[in-house]
Image (cartoon, grey):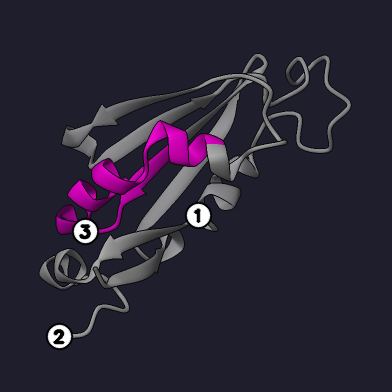
Amino acid sequence: MTTVQVRLVDIAHARSGDKGDTANVGLIALRPAWYPVLVKHVTKQRVAQHFAGQIHGDVDRFELPNLLALNFLLHGALDGGGTLSLKTDAQGKVYSTALLRMTIDVPADEARAARLPGASA
């Protein structure tokens, strides 16, 4: 099966912040047609793999279809949180940018149907 490698930065935007020792990352589709692609391919397992070595807990994923968004909780990401951590980014603001650097492999026919960047017509 032929796939298209899609950068999340090309199909979504993101926001992140801290909730204690947990980074909270929202991933929002730039177009309604791209939300189902995010739901299917940006799984909690894939996000955990992307952040391997940076977080020390589980990843939770919540779907917010009315906002065309996914919300991820990255447990154990902030070394105790904003008031305790010695990390440069103790509030977890960079996790949104880091998530947008992730790429997903989308079947070519699915990518064409959703008109994803990089999918040939």
Looking at the rendered structure, the secondary structure element under dot 2 is: loop
Q: CA distance from mark 3 to mark 1?
A: 15 Å
Q: Is residue 36 magenta?
A: yes
**Magenta span covers which residues?**
26-48
Q: CA distance from mark 1 to mark 2?
A: 24 Å
Q: Residue at x 39, y 43 (%)?
A: 27
Are circles 1 and 2 on residues that touch, CB within 8 Å? Answer: no
Q: Return the residue found at the far front.
A: 1
Q: Crowding at label 1, few (<14), some or many (≥20) Cα neighbours within 10 Å?
A: some
Q: Amino acid at mark 2?
A: Ala
Q: Is residue 73 magenta?
A: no
Q: Amino acid at mark 1?
A: Leu
Ranked by sequence position, the earlier of labels 3 and 1 is 3
86 sits left or right of 102 in the view: right
Q: Could you say where residue 48 lies in the image, as x and y percent from the top left?
A: 53, 34
Residue 82's tag is none
For the stretch drawn in magenta, the main secondary structure is helix
Q: Could you say where residue 78 lies in the image, as x and y percent from the top left?
A: 72, 24
14 sits left or right of 19 in the view: left
